[in-house]
Amino acid sequence: MQTFTSFHDQATAAAEKRLAVNTATMSSWGWHAMPNPDGFVLGDAMSRYETARGPVEYPDKFDMAAAFGGEVPEEYRAGTWLHVNPQRLDLGRVGLVLRPAADAPPEQDPAVLANTRQKLDLWSGALTSEFDYAGHEVRVTTVADPHHSRVAFRIESELLAGGRAGVTVRFPYASNGFFQTADWSAPDRHHTALTVLGARACRFDRTLDDTAYAVRLDWSDGRITATDEPHAFALTTSTAVLELVVGFTPADDGAGPTRVDFAAVREAAARWWRAFWMSGAAVDFAGSTDPRAAELERRVVLSQYLTAVHCAGAMPPQETGLATNSWQGKSHLEMHWWHAAHFPAWGRPELLERCLDWYLSILGTARETARRQQYDGARWPKHVGPDGRESPSDVGSLLIWQQPHPLYLLELLHRSRTGPERDRLVTRYAELVDETARFMASFVEERNGAHHLPAPVMPAQEFYDAKTTEDPTFELAYWWWGLEIAQAWRRRQGLPRHRDWQRIQDTLTAPHQDNGTYTAIATAPYLRRDDHPALLCALGVVPSTPLVDPAVMEATLLDVLATWDWNTAWGWDFPVMAMTATRVGRPDLAVDALLMDTGKNCWLPTGHTPQIGSLLPIYLPSNGGLLTAVSLMAAGWDGNGTPTPGFPADGTWTVRHEGFTPWP
């Protein structure tokens, strides 16, 4: 329950130098856009870049520093509006009201609670919270419906009957802040209509500008009333037990939410989680003498739970999932691989496939992006809402490593299926594969018989000058591998290998080297030793290709481990190193890299990995990345010939596993 809203405000927590998660109530379907009286369109945020194809416009007019709270210059106003809209909507907060006396103001500080304890039962999906307040025990059980936008609570306390405890339902306005979920200071900008539906149910109809949705509340006993606070409602009861179910639906959902009780939601959740844990792969480190084995197993188990909750929806997730907003709640498509590639590897391909049709839904928009930039095929965006329109950015609009992701994800899905299911996948996604590869083939530039990834391009390590950067190491290998996947999908359709694609693969330039190690890019400054060590992805995330020498990559890995500024790394960088170490035959380094003890690889009891304190207190690419790395370390890849190739064979690790799909 979201009881102490102001205490968990991220800006307040950051100022007080403590960690907080400003939990919201969010969905895949709930989005909002601020009014656009100027009628800004993407063309208003374009800059011209000179290329070998002639002048090309990219939507880069966005000033992040100004958008974070400064005055936005006139030339960036359009780009700023387009960047921060739409935003994922906080659908409402459901919390306890606790009062020292029945007529006293509600408590605002969790310090008044004593003997707090909380337990999540992973097997059933039930969260139990217990604490003492004013000499009485309070027990709250929370479960989420696995099939609908619905959450259910059971509250047990004598305080309920005495009028000193109750439930509040509050609705905020939307926020277009980068790490904010709600605006509580604008009550006049939205509307809430309460309709009572008999003795134990009501409906809230919500309108925010052009966005509308409905909320249904069902309860076991008591009554609902409006409070003196706008958009806030109180549910009180005269009994010591209160059960309630809150369901959210889009306004255009004709069926609307119907009455469901707590027991039904609890049973649905228990059935779903039992089926989840009894399916897919499993790994067991029992018998290991390495003292880190239990911690790795804890991270593995919690990451399976968290990614199932947050990363398996109808479209690619945001980095903080459905818990709190980051970057307006939009998807970062370059992160989708880290959120979801593990699902088919762990034998749960259906959790990945749920969102792949979303790529089909925005295929036309991706084609238009490529056409505008004078390319063939479809170019996938980086920072994006449900409509697929890219967000202006001098980084995101020039990023390319998200481009092969749909190919790789589809290939992993295909490997995890058999028989007619494979044929169905090939038929359904053949156009998406072809259009993705056509862009990749037209993006390269041929010079003196060799093909290059030309400027303007922004590599995964996002701190180079896109106007001069060429041939990033990871992206070169990924380009070859993506085209190879597309060639395989042609074969599965009975088509020959594409001759132009093959010529590009045969002549794609090898990554740049310096003193026997790879550099990040092939142009000055060649390598910065901070942020993402993404050059390692060229052999690790990407399987073996003709472009990358394993011995040189091993030397590069050793160089990175010895010289990188780890305070600037991010949560998925540690799985990157573990996968590279595994692929180059250094299991002695893989576990050390995966479990490196450094700031952004700190795992909380919940399984979350804060990256920027309370501004980014959750970072799900860490969780998905760990599962991806462990599956490669345990099950290996086609023909690798070594059991558990990512774990040292020195007797300190005992690894048993079943159900994994080997990697390419």
Image: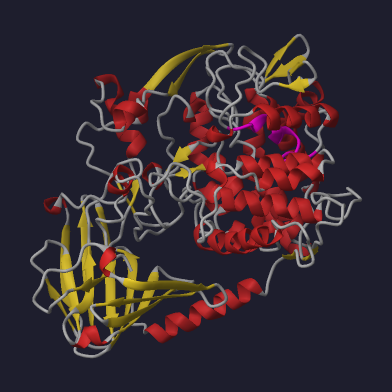
Relative image position of residue 534 (x, y in whole percent):
64, 32
**Relative to residue 135, is residue 239 depicted above or below?**
below
| The one of 408 and 18 positioned closer to us in this rendering | 18
**Relative to residue 411, is residue 166 depicted above or below?**
below
Looking at the rendering, which quadrant does residue 45 occupy? top left
Name the residue at 58% across, 29% down: 565
Q: How is the image coloured?
A: secondary structure
**Relative to residue 434, is residue 219 depicted above or below?**
below
Relative image position of residue 330 (x, y in whole percent):
42, 45
Name the residue at 67% across, 35% down: 437
Please say whether residue 538 is one of the residues in the magenta stretch: yes
Relative image position of residue 208 (x, y in whole percent):
21, 53
Q: Is residue 56 visible?
A: yes
Q: Is residue 427 visible?
A: no
Looking at the rendering, which quadrant does residue 451 occupy? top right
Image quarter hosting the N terminus = bottom left
Relative image position of residue 285 (x, y in whole percent):
75, 64
Identify the magenta region. Answer: 532-543
Which residue is at the far bottom?
239
Left or right: residue 33 compared with residue 454: left
Which residue is at the far top?
448
Looking at the rendering, which quadrant does residue 563 occupy? top right
Please say whether residue 121 is one of the residues in the magenta stretch: no
Q: How many marks?
A: 0
| The one of 280 and 131 positioned closer to us in this rendering | 131
